[in-house]
Image (spheres, coloured by chain):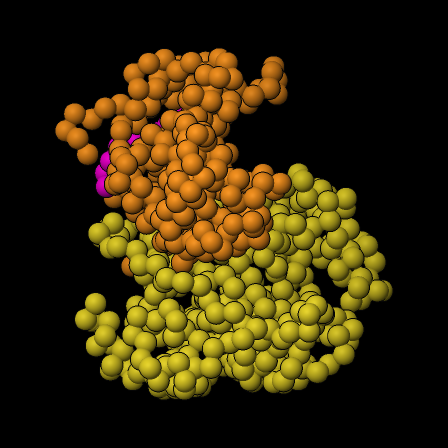
Amino acid sequence: MEMGKTILEVNELTTRYITRFGESVYAVDHVSLKVEEGKSLGIAGESGCGKSTLALSLMGYYFAPLHYMSGEIIIDGQNISGMDPDEVRKSILGREIAYIPQAAMNALNPTQKVLSFIEDVIQAHDPYRTKKEIYELAKGFFESLGLPAEVLHKYPVELSGGMKQRTVIATAVILFPKVLIADEPSSALDVTSQKMVIKMLRNLMEDGFIKSLIFITHELPLLYNVTDDIMVMYAGQIVEKGTAREVVFDPLHPYAKGLMGSIIVPEEGVRSVKLTAIPGVPPNLKKPPMGCRFADRCKYVMPECRVTSVGLRDIGGGRAYRCLLSEEELRRAYKHD
Amino acid sequence: MTKERQVCLSGTGVTKVFGLGRRKTVAVDHVDFSFYEGEVVSIVGESGSGKTTLAKMLLGLLNPTEGEIYFQGQKRDISTHRKKREYWKNIQAIFQDPFASYNIFNKIDTVLLDCIHMRGGRGLPRAKKVEMMAQACSFVNLKFEELTNKYPFELSGGQMQRLMIARIFLLMPKILIADEPTSMIDACSRATILDMLMQLRNDIGMTIIFITHDIGLAYYVSDTVYIMERGKIVEHGSADTVILHPREAYTRRLISDVPKIYEEWDLSTV
């Protein structure tokens, strides 16, 4: 496993939301992860389990109600946790780490042409660039990504959904960040545009415009095809991590197993498989349960689960899961179903 | 399913043209279809292929420019508002965006009560109505006691979509049009929603028409699949035939655009 240089390293990161009633919601709870150069990491989980909060927390740029608690974020050797937010915005965002938000299509300014948006982005980081230089740069960059240069002279309303999304991605990476965080970049698109977006992200990685990618989605087949590793999140914690193949075909944590039961693909044999839904909803993170956070929805729950807090169990080869049951016990239980 | 399959909704040469002259757009171009009772049909196509326009015409929200739609063998007549309301007792819809599907001024009780009233339950005693509402809510795994006096926007997306199904449960239409019912909610709630719809189909023999761009979903749920390209139906047939042995290049492309897990996903085709 030990090969490339580590680009992003996160140790025990904890962030919380403080509501207007003064309550704390621990949406990211002691999350550790590592992304190597040229690798991509996928984060899976249902809505409300902290995927998007993790993405925001990774940028090191916190604004109320999200607050930093503890832990460290190291990008290419530089620790950015605890840095001043303004400093982070000026020197980290865009250059070291870039983020594509969930509704990226609404990220473009409807009153501006795409080019002037890009001018704003570049001039915020490098005020001495001339407009001509920026145009040349943007044109070359867009063309190398397979986007027509006419896009630069258009207003966002003139572009289709898929085109807008690709424009936003191209703008996000125009300063060649080391890490790109894509938060559900394709969930509002139809399958054809989705494929184009995915292809573009892959090309960005292959051509070295970005060094590593963090991809967040709830669509597992997509994650399986895009990323090298998958991390499953539940209620702010990592419940399972491993390579994409391992997590999709051999999930260990009961929650990960449940997620795999919701996969739909147009392949033979899918119609005979019954979709399994996980009953219930994620716990309220204002008062997280004392023991395992998945206990209330778990099929294999034991009395100990509700009282013992469960740590992430490392089983070697980069694989880890958070459950009291051993690997063999879990496999036996799944075989039994 | 009965042996003698009854045609429930059919159409011949249904066309919708938007705009005039040079700016004319033919959204739906002379399509013929027949949907049978108790069948799950999917209409699949990419965005802009006219599938939502077709759905709106089926619902009677748009009038076809040309062509006829037949409901249970009779020519559909929705010329007056009264006739339209009568028609809507038989055909109902679930839309893509649950957040935009509710009247924001109505409480959940009102939403459900309206459904009971629409089925002619206006004169029922209050206790009976509450019982019916509670039953509908429990069908979709919601607790009615927790929902009373709440507004739809206080619920999550998945809950709202389930409330939509509770409405359908009370209305018991003959046909349900589900326009991308699961594209705004996450994959885990999707399984729940699909299960509930299938259960409705099995319980009351409803015809379900799925409008989707996700051919994987279409393959999973439907008996029959219609593929639309630029307003035309290019291929239709049983789900197994269309998805596993597609004839048209367009269908093959749609299938190749969906990420797979057992086969290699070819990214070079876009």
**Image quarter in which the N terminus of chain B is found:** top left
Residue B109 lies, in percent from the top left, at 51, 43
Q: What is the display colour for chain B?
A: orange
Nearer to the camera, A201 or B80: B80
* Residue under the point 45% across and 30% down: B122
* Residue under the point 53% across and 53% down: B155
* Residue under the point 77% across and 51% down: A116
Q: Which chain is painted in yellow?
A: A
Q: Is residue A165 above or below residue B120?
A: below
Is residue B235 a member of the stretch shown in magenta? yes
The answer to whether any part of residue A2 appears in the image is yes
Residue A335 lies, in percent from the top left, at 20, 71
Q: How many marks are shown on the rendered structure?
A: 0
Nearer to the camera, B123 or B98: B123
Is residue B51 a member of the stretch shown in magenta? no
* Residue under the point 37% across and 81% down: A305
Quadrant of residue B44 within the rendered picture: top left
Q: Is residue A250 above or below residue B211?
A: below
Q: Is residue B119 above or below residue B212?
A: above
The answer to whether any part of residue A143 appears in the image is no
Left or right position of A191 against B197: right
User: Where does the magenta region start and end?
Assistant: B232-241
Quadrant of residue A294 within the rendered picture: bottom left
Left or right position of A133 against A107: right
What secondary structure prevails in the magenta region?
strand
Left or right position of A63 against B251: right
Quadrant of residue A118 within the rendered picture: bottom right
Nearer to the camera, B83 or B233: B83
Residue A269 lies, in percent from the top left, at 22, 53
Residue B184 lies, in percent from the top left, at 50, 49
Q: Is residue B196 above or below residue A275?
A: above
